[in-house]
Image: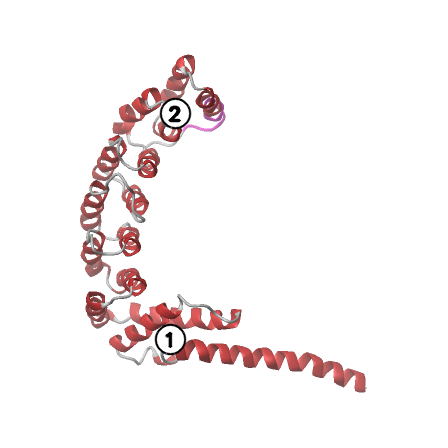
Amino acid sequence: MNISVSAARIVVVPLAVAALAFAAGYALGVSRSGGAPSSTSAASPAKTLDDYAAAVVRGKGTFRDPLERIAYDEKLKSLESALAASGAAGFDACMERLAREKAPEVREAIAAILPRIDERRAAPVLAERLLDPNETEQVRATAAGKLAHLDRAVAVPALLKSLEGISERAWTGSRAVVEALAFLGGPEASAGLLRAFERRSLDLSIRIAAAEALGTLRSADAWDALERCVRFETSDHYSRRTAVRSMLEIDRSRAKALIAEQKAVEQDAGFLQFLEDAERVASLTAPAPKAR
């Protein structure tokens, strides 16, 4: 009997310690991010935003144990939900804070939460952030990603302007801009992506991303540029391979014919092997569906 009691104590004590550790971790997370989660619904939007900013900054630090991290994540979700439900007053508070906030991680978090409060008002704000050369690249990248899901009448022109402004050196959000345009689609997006692909001086990673997007959109207008890349850009194996894949997406039969022609004249052994592999894959897989 004594053995059973001792064993029970051995089990209960660690459980009690774990419970205390969770409570301590939770309290620590709350105290560092400002207020208890249950109070967020009653707090003013400005106070909730202050708590949210503090929580975002806290998230850049380290956590002593997993329970503390769990408590922090729950706190952050609670604050995000409160802000998302804060309406016009919350949006106004975010705009005021965005204008004066120094911490880029907080500006990024505010940019990300704006569409959850008001999609219509968020679109032009995020477009402005995307095109602001004084804004950090990470904030601009977040703005680009969010614009892909907002009013295309606002998003597409801003994304195209950003893409056209990319210099020879890509920035952190360059690929996010390309991916947003690929997601939105349409003639304007396809034309902008084609212009980017045709800029031989553009950073290689962006040209490749643009070629991939043109294939995703099955842009028939891109065919000639993609074909020129395959036939003549012999020193750029990455772009050539991406061009072949995109052409297979656009028109499977026509691409197979081009592959056969290129195999007959290809001088690079590595690219020749790629063409043979692409030809086999194209023969095994079903034709790509028609463009939407």
- Structural distance between the alpha carbons of marks 2 and 1: 55 Å
Does the magenta run of residues contain 259? Answer: no
The residue at the point 45 percent across, 78 percent down is 28
Q: Could you classify mark 2 by the number of other residues whose Cα lies within 10 Å: few (under 14), some (14-19), or many (20 or more)? A: many
Displayed quadrant of residue 226:
top left
The residue at the point 34 percent across, 31 percent down is 290
Q: Main secondary structure of the magenta part?
A: helix
Please state the extent of the stretch shown in magenta in the rendering: 279-287
Q: Earlier in the sequence, mark 2 or mark 1?
A: 1
Q: Position of residue 190 (x, y in %)?
A: 25, 36
In the displayed structure, 203 sits above or below 248; it is below
- Residue flagged by tag 1: what amino acid is it? Ser
Does the magenta run of residues contain 280? Answer: yes
Q: Nearer the viewer, mark 2 or mark 1?
A: 1
Count of numbered circles on the image = 2
Horizontal side of 71 relative to 235 (left or right) equals right
Q: Position of residue 285 (x, y in %)?
A: 47, 28
The residue at the point 31 percent across, 39 percent down is 206
The furthest residue to the bottom = 2
Which residue lies under the disc numbered 1?
33
In the displayed structure, 31 sits above or below 165; it is below
Q: Position of residue 175 (x, y in %)?
A: 32, 44
Q: Position of residue 29 (x, y in %)?
A: 43, 75
Tag 2's secondary structure?
A: helix
Displayed quadrant of residue 136:
bottom left
Which residue lies under the disc numbered 2?
252
